[in-house]
Amino acid sequence: MTDRYLPGRDDYSDMLDLPRPVSKKHPPMSIEKRAAQFMPFAALTGFESAVQKAGLLFEEEADRGNVEFVEFEEF
């Protein structure tokens, strides 16, 4: 940033030695809860079990000889 936008505040030197703010209303969040905010989630509920079920059905059909395997070239 240039001095034209925030004169004298472009390097944040006025805040570097300030203590970390602590809320008086809210207790600190546990490490487990903080980590859970960044964990992946299941966007499609039930998708994983549907894929597993389809795989099991395919294996059963393959064992019976009802599946024709087709090979394809890799890219």
Image (cartoon, grey):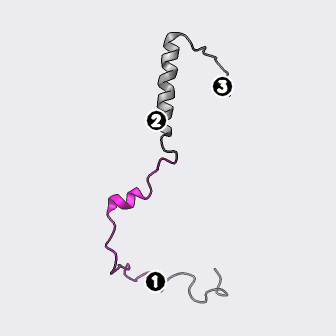
The residue identified by callout 2 is 49
Q: Secondary structure at mark 2?
A: helix
Mark 1 or mark 2: name the one nearer the start of the chain.
1
Q: Secondary structure at mark 3?
A: loop
The residue identified by callout 1 is 15
Residue type at mark 1? Answer: Met
Q: Which mark is residue 59?
A: none
Badge nearest the viewer, 3 or 2: 2
Residue type at mark 2? Answer: Ser
The residue identified by callout 3 is 74
Q: For this rendering, which residue is in front, 69 or 11?
A: 69
Badge nearest the viewer, 1 or 3: 3
Residue type at mark 3? Answer: Glu
Membership of 40 in magenta stretch: yes
Direction top: furthest residue: 65
Give the residues in magenta: 14-43
Q: Position of residue 23 (x, y in %)?
A: 35, 79
